[in-house]
Amino acid sequence: MDLWLSEQQELIRDAAKDYAQRRLEPRAAWRDETGTFPAKEYKEMAELGFLGMNIPESLGGSETGVLAYSLAVTEIAKADASVAVGMSVTNMVAEALTAFARDNVAKKHVPAICSGDYLAGAFALTEAGSGSDAGSLRTTANKVGDDYILNGAKIYITSADHAGVFIVMARSDRNQNGPKGVSAFAVPADTPGVTLGKKERKMGQHGSSTLEVLFEDCKIPASHLLAEEGQGFKVAMMALNGGRVGIGSLALGLGRAALDFSRDYSLERKQFGKPISTNQAIQWKLADMATTLDAAELLVRRAAWLKENKRPFTKEACMAKVYATETANEVCKEAIQILGGYGYVKDYPVERYYRDARVTTLYEGTSEIQRLVIARELLNEVQGA
Ligand code: CAA
C-alpha cells in the first residue's frame, strides 16, 4: 500500500476541505439546531462530483476512486458529519446500482444521483424487527407476472425524504427465513405505494434526515431487481462493505475536528496563570487523541486502498469502521474534558461533535457486528471455511 497521496487525490482532498470550510462549517450549528437538510449544498456537492466518486464517467460519476472519496468524506465530516453521512450513503447507493442494476435501470438512476437531480439515494435494509440480524427482514416481494409487489416497512432510512431512488431489500422467497430468501430492488421514490412515515428525532446528526419508509402494494418491474433473485442479502452486504469505509472516513473527520478544536483551545485557555496546554494532563490527552486518530486513518486508508485495487476488503473495512468510530467517540469525549464546562454548552462545537459521533458505532453495523465479521473472517482464513 502506498502511503503517499497522488497529486489528484491531494487536489480532491483540498477541494473538499475548501468547500466544507467555506460552505458547510459556518451553518453546521444552525443545521444542528433547526434540523435543516442542506438541499442546496447537496446540489453543490454534486456539481463538485462528490455524489458519485467511484462511479464511471459514462454514468455521470467523477471516477476519482475510493481513496479520494474517503478523503473527501473526512473533510466534509470535519465541517458537518450530518452532511457527510448523506454523502456517504448516496455514494454507496450509486455504487451498488452501478454494480448490480440492469443496464437501463443504472442508466436512469445513477446519472440522476451523480448530477444532484435526485439530491440523494437511500438504502432500505433495516426494519423494526431486523437491525443487526438483517437477514431476518420481513418486507415481502411477491412475483406477479413481470412485476414484484412490495409490502412492508423500513426504519431509520437516511435521506429518505430527499431520495430519488431507494435500494430495498425484501423477502422474495417466503419459504426461506434467513438471508437466502432476500432480493434487492431499485425502487424509484415516486413509485405508487411508497410513502414516508415517522421522521426520527435524534440525539445528533440533525442535518441528516432519518425516516420510516412504507411500501404498500408497490409494483416494481422485474427489471429493477439487483443482481439475481435471492442474491439481495449479498448485494446489501457488499454495498455495506464499501459503506463502512465511508463511515470510518466520516468518524475520522469528526475526531480530527474535535482534536483540532480542543488543541487550539488549550493553547488559548489560561488557568493558574498559564495556558492549560502546558499541563501534562492535557498534553497526554492530546497525544493519545492524535495517536489513535492516526491509527484510525491508517486503517481507513488501507481499507480504501484495498477496495480501490479490487482486493478483498470486508475484514479491513470492518476494522476501519469499528476502530475509527470508537476512536471518534473517545476523542470527542476527551475534547469536552479539555474544554471543561465550555465543552458542554452549545457556544462551542465539541458538544455537537460528541452527539454526532455517538451514532457512528451504530449505523452501517454496530461495533459488535463489525467485531463479529472480523472474527468470522479471521477464523475462516485458518479454517478455510
Ligand atoms: N460481504 C460479502 N458477503 C457477505 C458479507 C459481507 N460483509 N456478510 C455476509 N455475506 C454473505 C455470506 O458470505 C453468506 O454467503 P453464502 O450464503 O454464500 O455463504 C451470506 O452473505 C449470508 O451471510 P451470513 O450467513 O454471515 O449471515 P448472518 O445472518 O449470519 O449474519 C451479518 C450476517 C454479518 C450479521 C449481517 O446481518 C450484518 O452485517 N448485519 C448488520 C446490518 C447492518 O450493517 N445494518 C446497517 C443498516 S444500513 C445503514 O445503517 C445505512 C444508513 O442509512 C446509515
Image (cartoon, rainbow, N blue to C red):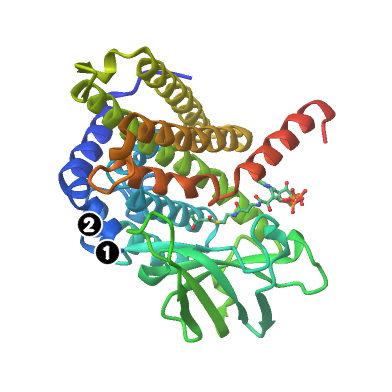
Q: Position of residue 134 (x, y in %)?
A: 67, 59
At 43% from the left edge and 56% from the top edge, which residue is drawn?
203
Give left or right: position of 384 versus 344. Answer: right
At 33% from the left edge and 52% from the top edge, which residue is drawn?
83
Gap in Å between the C-alphas at discs 1 and 2? 6 Å
Dot 2 beta carbon under 8 Å from ligand 1: no
At 36% from the left edge and 18% from the top edge, which residue is drawn?
4
- Identify the residue under disc 1: 34
Q: Position of residue 147 (x, y in %)?
A: 61, 81
Between residue 369 and residue 95, name the one nearer to us: 369
Question: Label 2: few (<14), some or many (≥20) within 10 Å?
Answer: few
Instruction: Determine which quarter of the picture holds residue 37.
Output: bottom left
Pointer 1 with pointer 2, Cβ within 8 A: yes
Vertical position of residue 7 compared to residue 79: above or below: above
Q: Kindly identify the amino acid type of the residue bearing the numbered disc 2.
A: Trp
Judging from the image, what secondary structure is the residue with disc 1 in?
helix
Q: Kindly identify the amino acid type of the residue bearing the numbered disc 1.
A: Thr
Q: How many marks?
A: 2
At 65% from the left edge and 74% from the top edge, which residue is drawn?
139
- Identify the residue under disc 2: 30
Between residue 292 and residue 5, name the one nearer to us: 292
Q: Position of residue 321 (x, y in %)?
A: 53, 38
Residue 250 seen by the camera: yes
Judging from the image, what secondary structure is the residue with disc 2 in?
helix
Give left or right: position of 272 versus 215. Answer: left
Give left or right: position of 357 versus 303. Answer: left
Which residue is most to the front? 272
Between residue 360 and residue 380, name the one nearer to us: 360
Which residue is most to the left? 22
Vertical position of residue 111 compared to residue 347: above or below: below
Instruction: Determine which quarter of the picture holds residue 133.
Output: bottom right
Q: Position of residue 47 (x, y in %)?
A: 22, 53
